[in-house]
Amino acid sequence: MRRRQTRPNIFRNLKRFGVYQGDWKYILIPTAVMYFLPFVFGIWIYYIPAGFPLGLMTFIVLLGVFNFLRASKPECWLKNRFDAASDGWKNFRAPVNDEFGQTDWIKKKR
């Protein structure tokens, strides 16, 4: 029986239009918002609903930005950036009793 060819790097992310599959949510959600909001508020430019040009422009700009970021930044840069921004500066607990004092493993010179 003949062996079948397998795709090398099977666990590697696939790119579509230069954008990895995990980043599409950051492109499609703002595009959908910019497309539907003018319809909700009834904004028209002459006889054209403003959602169409705004949605198309948002998609093109975000696609270009993500292609640039992917070329210049490491793979999980955006996800880690959003995680760091959402965490912010966490409060640490105050030192208890004499934690800043001398510990057992440090010996004083006498």
Image (cartoon, grey):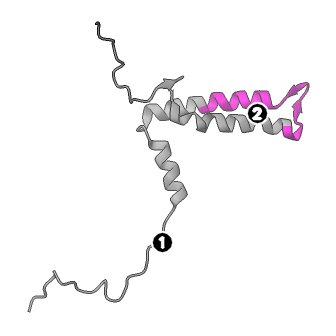
Task: Using the image, determine if residue 2 lies above or below residue 82.
Answer: above
Residue type for callout 1: Asn
> What are the residue bounds of the magenta stretch?
40-62
Q: Magenta-highlighted stretch: main secondary structure?
A: helix
**What secondary structure is found at the residue carrying circle 1?**
loop
Task: Using the image, determine if residue 104 lies above or below residue 43.
Answer: below
Residue where numbered disc 1 is placed = 91
* Residue 35 within the segment the image draws in magenta: no
Residue drawn at x 89%, y 37% as measured from the top left: 42
Residue drawn at x 48%, y 72% as measured from the top left: 91
Quadrant in the rendering for residue 63 = top right
* Residue 51 within the segment the image draws in magenta: yes
Could you tell me which quadrant the C terminus lies in?
A: bottom left
Q: Residue furthest left?
A: 110
Image spot of residue 74 (x, y percent): 40, 38
Could you tell me which quadrant the N terminus lies in?
A: top left
How many neighbours does mark 1 have within 10 angstroms: few (below 14), some (14-19), or many (20 or more)?
Answer: few
Residue drawn at x 27%, y 86% as measured from the top left: 101
Residue type for callout 2: Tyr
Q: Is residue 97 left or right of residue 28?
A: left
